[in-house]
Amino acid sequence: MKVVVVGGGVVGLSSAYELASRGCEVVLLEADRCGAGASHGNAAKVALAESAPVPGPGVLLQGIRWILRSDSPLAIRPSLAPGYLSFLLRMAMRCNARDFADGLDLHLRLGADANDLFDEYVRQGMDFEMHSRGVLLAFTTRERFDEHCASLPAFESAGYAPRLLQDDEVQEAEPALRDHLRYGLVFSADRQIEPDSLTAALRMSLASLGGIVREGVRVSGFVRGGDTVNAVVTTEAEVIRADAFVLAAGVPSAALAAKLGRRVPIRSGKGYSVDYSPAPIEPRTSLTLEDARVAVTPLDGMLRLAGTMEFGSTDDSVNAVRVEAIRRAAAEAFRDWEAPAGERVPWAGSRPMTPDGLPVIGRVAGTANAYLNSGHSMLGLTLAPGSARLLASLMTGSPAALPDNLIARVSPDRFSLTHR
């Protein structure tokens, strides 16, 4: 079976590699450079400890409270676009305890084998930077700590039981932290992966299996015969035929699905990251400064800070105020953070968000052979291997890793709107 995969981020590349591993002839098309989008600037973490969906009790209400704060961890840019308002309304309907718990359970199941699958990549010859330092979620206030602890039974039932810390135990676990960070949760299973090295390794391994990767190729449409998609058409009017097609292009996947007659609500949630090389501090573990919602990830020769969620942005421009908020969070959290040198150019990128906070994986309704693998929000790196395996199983008729009721939870069919 010949498959065209549209999108060269970590989700698209892992999907292409999984399909090629199962004997498919794969052509991957990337509009820019592979790994150059949201995959490049993510928090560089396999974040099993932070698998909660974005919509949660009180999330949008907090966003409204912060709407006038340009440096808040969550920003909602006002927009009168009907599609945008509909997206926020759908998200608001999911900000409840039951949907939050169900979404967390699904993410934990989809990411359950993430570490094993990354280890399998290594056994198959991929060379990328990976660490097993775990993660410390650090809290200033008891309120935020207790709020997070309310979801711990779901983690524990999935096999992720954290170690709870209080007062001096937090600084004993991470001496770089200041004393006002008084509460902590240590999840030992979380890993750190330098994303550029992973996407490069996936691309190389895909090529070793005969896969073809073409960069700078933008898809403008499709050729159809009834419910069968016969080919993609590029902006250069090139027609590329195949037996099946995968849309794994992040946020642009929504526009591509619309060209197939389906409206899938995937919108941008802009995130930011700042890298320091050399690293100004050497933390023992990766961290998330929970009150500021800033991730701190040590990598070889560098340190990455990542954070914020910005809804309503239409481009990937860097907002200096939001970058400064990330820097300030580090300065307030770490003892020896004194205007460190070696800061690289800050990054901003669009992460593909859905109103229920869950990925979209499966066949596009109204087609016999077009599939989606997108909408992973801030968990693209964490969920990419499991999503790729699930997608490949659905496409090749192999036994799926998830039961049917959970497959239905991520199916594009849950958004039953026909594009007009």
Image: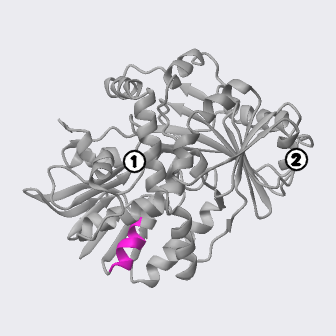
Amino acid carrying mark 2 in the image: Glu
Crowding near pointer 2: few (<14 within 10 Å), some, many (20+)? Answer: few
Residue occupying the point 64% across, 33% down? 319
Sequence-wise, the earlier of marks 1 and 2 is 2
Which residue reaches farthest left? 226
Res 278 visible: yes
Provide the secondary structure element on which disc 2 rests.
helix
Task: Choose between 269 and 355: the one closer to the eye.
Answer: 355
* Disc 1 element: loop
Based on the picture, tell me whether residue 51 belongs to the magenta stretch.
Answer: no
Q: Quadrant of the N terminus?
A: bottom left
Looking at the picture, tell me which residue is in the foreground, 240 or 409: 409
Q: Of 336 and 56, which appears nearest the observer?
A: 56
- The residue wearing badge 2 is 172
Q: Which residue is mark 1?
A: 359
Residue 394 to residue 56: above or below = below
- Residue 251 screen position, x and y as percent: 41, 45
Q: How crowded is the residue under tag 1: few (<14 C-alpha within 10 Å), some, or many (20+)?
A: many
From the image, give the main secondary structure of the stretch colored magenta.
helix
Instruction: Say which of marks 1 and 2 sits in front.
Output: 2
Residue 28: quadrant of the picture: bottom left
Please give the range of residues in magenta: 15-22
Q: Position of residue 318 (x, y in %)?
A: 63, 38
Q: Amino acid at mark 1?
A: Pro
